[in-house]
């Protein structure tokens, strides 16, 4: 992260490889794997590149990545009028050992947007309550209560389907079984191909700003 901030374009490859899976799953579990999801995924990474020169520390740049997720997905829901996610199709696949995880993901998709958003930041991105609160601009107490309510609803519906263990630890374990999915190769190519253009556009903007000063 620090090398990328200092202008090492090659450092983006390792950053992208590290974060692409969780970003992809977060986007796809909100709005699917069709063209809308693909477009939003591209916008998130374009925004991350744009934020590189504005962040003062690697930690703040990473926070900017998560805030970009928040802005893009909220904008999507506002534009589309959707309160729940689009169908995911073949996003989650696995053998009998991950069937509760598959059902859990389906249930996550049915949650109201704010619950789904907070839960995915916790389960998929791995943020703490305080970190989620920072990204969303809300209190940690609000985030914790929202996630608790989402977990309770999911646990009840899993139990109704015959799941014997619906503790918080079990829910996280079921979800972790679904986290092997990564972006399609075509999505990866979109980002890698666009990177030089994004960097060039950003450099030109910074040059223009210096000229005006």
Image: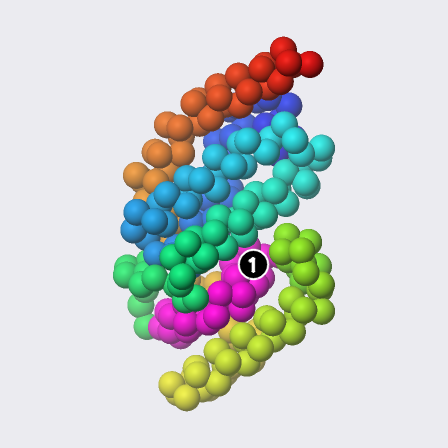
* Residue nearest the viewer, comparing 205 with 176: 205
| Mark 1 Cα-neighbour bin, 10 Å: few <14, some 14–19, many ≥20 | many
Q: Residue at x 47, y 52 (%)?
A: 75
Q: Is residue 38 visible?
A: yes
Q: Residue 123, image x and y in percent?
A: 54, 62
Q: Residue 68, image x and y in percent?
A: 54, 45
* Residue 88 counted in the magenta span: no
Q: Is residue 29 visible?
A: no
Q: Is residue 41 left or right of residue 116?
A: left
Q: Is residue 166 left or right of residue 131?
A: left
- Overall secondary structure of the magenta section: helix
* Residue nearest the viewer, comparing 71 with 24: 71
Q: How many dots with numbers? A: 1
Which residues, given as a range, are shown in magenta? 98-127
Secondary structure of the residue carrying tag 1 is: helix
The quadrant in which residue 208 appears is top right
Query: Circle 1 is placed at which residue position?
Result: 121
**Quarter in which the C terminus is drawn:** top right
Q: Residue at x 43, y 82 (%)?
A: 158
* Residue nearest the viewer, comparing 27 with 58: 27
Q: Residue at x 67, y 34 (%)?
A: 55
In the rendered image, the residue lying farthest to the top is 211
Q: Residue at x 49, y 65 (%)?
A: 113
Question: Looking at the picture, does residue 134 appear above or below residue 49?
Answer: below
Q: Is residue 49 left or right of residue 56?
A: left
The quadrant in which residue 11 appears is top right
* Residue 106 counted in the magenta span: yes
The quadrant in which residue 149 appears is bottom right
Q: Residue 162, image x and y in percent?
A: 39, 87
């Amino acid at each position: 992260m620090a090398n990328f901030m200092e202008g090492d374009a090659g450092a983006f490859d390792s950053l992208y490889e590290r974060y692409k899976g969780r970003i992809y799953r977060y986007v796809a579990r909100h709005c699917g794997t069709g063209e809308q999801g693909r477009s939003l995924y591209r916008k998130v990474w374009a925004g991350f590149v744009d934020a590189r020169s504005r962040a003062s520390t690697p930690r703040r740049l990473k926070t900017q990545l998560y805030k970009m997720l928040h802005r893009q997905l909220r904008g999507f829901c506002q534009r589309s009028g959707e309160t729940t996610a689009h169908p995911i199709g073949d996003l989650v696949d696995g053998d009998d050992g991950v069937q509760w995880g598959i059902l859990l993901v389906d249930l996550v998709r049915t949650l109201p947007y704010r619950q789904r958003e907070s839960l995915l930041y916790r389960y998929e991105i791995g943020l703490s309550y305080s970190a989620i609160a920072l990204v969303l601009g809300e209190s940690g107490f609000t985030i914790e209560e929202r996630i608790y309510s989402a977990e309770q609803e999911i646990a009840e519906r899993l139990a109704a389907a015959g799941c014997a263990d619906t503790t918080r630890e079990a829910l996280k374990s079921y979800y972790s079984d679904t986290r092997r999915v990564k972006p399609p190769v075509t999505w990866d190519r979109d980002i890698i191909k666009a990177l030089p253009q994004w960097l060039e556009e950003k450099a030109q903007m910074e040059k223009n700003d210096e000229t005006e000063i």
